[in-house]
Image (spheres, helix red, strand yellow):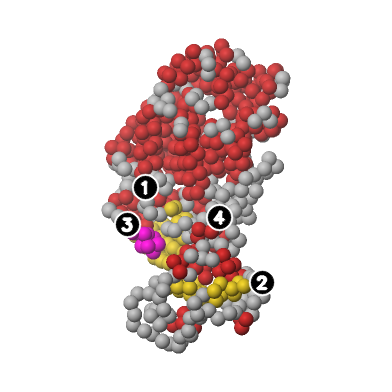
Amino acid sequence: MAAERPFLVPVVVDDTGDQDAVVPDPFRAVQWTRLPAGDTPPEFATRIGRLLSPEPSSTPTAARPAGGVAAAGGSVPMPPTPPSPWLRRLPAAIAVVATLAVAYLLIDRLRTQRPVATTTPATAAGPATSPVGGAPATAAAPGVFTPPPHSIAVLPFVNMSGDKEQEYFSDGLTEELLNSLARINELQVAARTSAFSFKGKDVKIGAIARELNVGAILEGSVRRSGQTVRISAQLINAVTGFHLWSETYDRDLKDVLKVQTEIANAVASALKVTLLGDAAAKIELGGTRNPAAFDAYLRAAKAANGHHDAKDMQTAVAAYTEAIGLDSNYALAFAGRSIALSGYASEFARGAETRESFDRARADAQRAIALAPELAESHLALGLYFERGALDFARAVEEYERAVAQGAGNAKVLIQYAAFAANVGPASAGVAAARRAIVLDPLNFRSHFTLGRTLYDSRQYTQALPALQDALALDPDNPQVYAFRGVTYYSLGNLQGAQASCETKPDYWFSQVCLAITYERLTRHADAQAVLGKLQAWGGDSASYQYAQVYAQWGNTAKALESLDTAMRVRDPGLSQLATDQLLDPLRREPRFQALERALKFPH
């Protein structure tokens, strides 16, 4: 077999004779292999592996036995096939003949032999990483790439406007197109964070596809000038490298949503996905036809997705408000603002501002549902409010389950649902949702962090650590992951590991919880008290739940219960963790604690 030379391996999977087959002429020049019912003997797979190997075959062509395929240690006996004239064409009924190039043969006939790609467990010394983007490594058979059918990644469209300030527009347009495709149930779409991790990097399409485990890549460019926009898009088969489809659209800005629909339909058609019902309505669900509103929404989404502090969240809320002011029926903008307000109330707001933000979040979520009841983001927003703002977990379950049903391919929905299920149960549902989120968004630290969190809440501490390590490989500066890894070490009795992890980011509030309990266990009482004092100065009554965690671990039951009473009075969002929180285990036999748990009405 000459190096770098394409070759064919025709395979017959039924009793079709060579004279009855309707096939391209080149297939008649090659000996056929017969695999009744498509069953693949190990010897045949071995032989194909040899043909694909860069090493020269040890079996000369002339030595191959007639009617069989040479393999290591012998041959696969097959019924002899008489040679056929090169140009013979016979009219015949449809023949079921798998006349495929070897790459396709391996995809379709050996799929069941492929090991599932899984995140490589990391050790305490550090996680295994892949050569692309520093992401967690995945295990797969060498030389075999068999992505799920109808799987696709949408890479960030390149900003060709010549203005760096227009970057948010090309990124936002990409994200909206990605979300549109994700609403097509038959497609598996890699989530935004993973797809965007390759932005600005010189990585080949094949490497990206393997990293994201997708069979197709959609890429393109955006050139915006005033109220006109040119969008170029191309769809590439990631296995073969061939272009499946490409198109360029010159449109008025107000028609951008129509272009999204056209591209999504074209992609589905190229991937041979059958769209059922009103596909356009599903793709455009919750959107706007107002170009200025769309522009403001993209700016808001950019601020919310990349937020690091309260100012970023306030910027997002302001831009969502601008979008809503321009289009009062923009469901996605209402849902986005609701989620941003709940996030702000949970992470950054203090005192009366907390309740005010939650009240606004509820109104926005209800408005989004009224406008677009089938929009997953709308129900996600209301579920988030019920979980954190109202502590109404039964209604939160209803909304989260609706969101998952309508957005099964939306990693953001799955991540939020997984975190919620880990808190209120069933924990197994949270773990399953987190694992599915990793499939859709493998390069997003939050997918791996959420898996670690759900495993921790399931009290599978040893299994949680590799997932948290993988999260740190993707976001080495994230204080939330260091803090949670520290508490996981603490739960395993590894106090040195807990101290080292939480001291990495000591100013983060949950790191302070971790250090307060770890220092106390290490008999560093003064240091423990100092850290708790710092946390109390920062949080006031709004962090009462965290004080209860510390006091419970210190063995100060009275103070812990008093802190929980305060948390109930101020409706601390942390109470959503009470049913499964291991740090509160010392309180579970206390009547006051049990009464509080009953008052919160956890559904499981």
Q: Disc 2 or disc 3, which is closer to the eye? A: 2
Q: Nearer the viewer, residue 127 or 19?
A: 19
| Residue occupied by mark 3 | 275
Query: Rounded to the nearest whole Å, what is the CA distance between mark 1 and mark 4?
Result: 43 Å
Query: Nearer the N terminus, badge 1 or badge 4?
Result: 4
Name the side, left or right, on which 450 lies relative to 462: left
Name the residue rendered at 39%, 72% in the picture.
96
Query: Which residues lie in the magenta part?
Result: 265-274
Query: Nearer the N terminus, badge 2 or badge 4?
Result: 2
| Residue occupied by mark 4 | 115
Name the residue rendered at 54%, 58% in the picture.
114
Name the side, left or right, on which 171 lies relative to 552: left
Check the image and report above or below for 275 versus 82: above
Q: Disc 3 or disc 4, which is closer to the eye? A: 4
Query: Nearer the N terminus, badge 2 or badge 3?
Result: 2
Check the image and report above or below for 427 versus 533: below
| Residue occupied by mark 1 | 294
Neighbour class for label 1 at 10 Å: few (<14), some, many (≥20)? Answer: many
Q: Quadrant of the C terminus?
A: top left
Q: Disc 1 or disc 3, which is closer to the eye? A: 3
Of helix, strand and loop, which one carries label 4? loop
Of helix, strand and loop, which one carries label 2? loop
| Main SS category, magenta section | helix
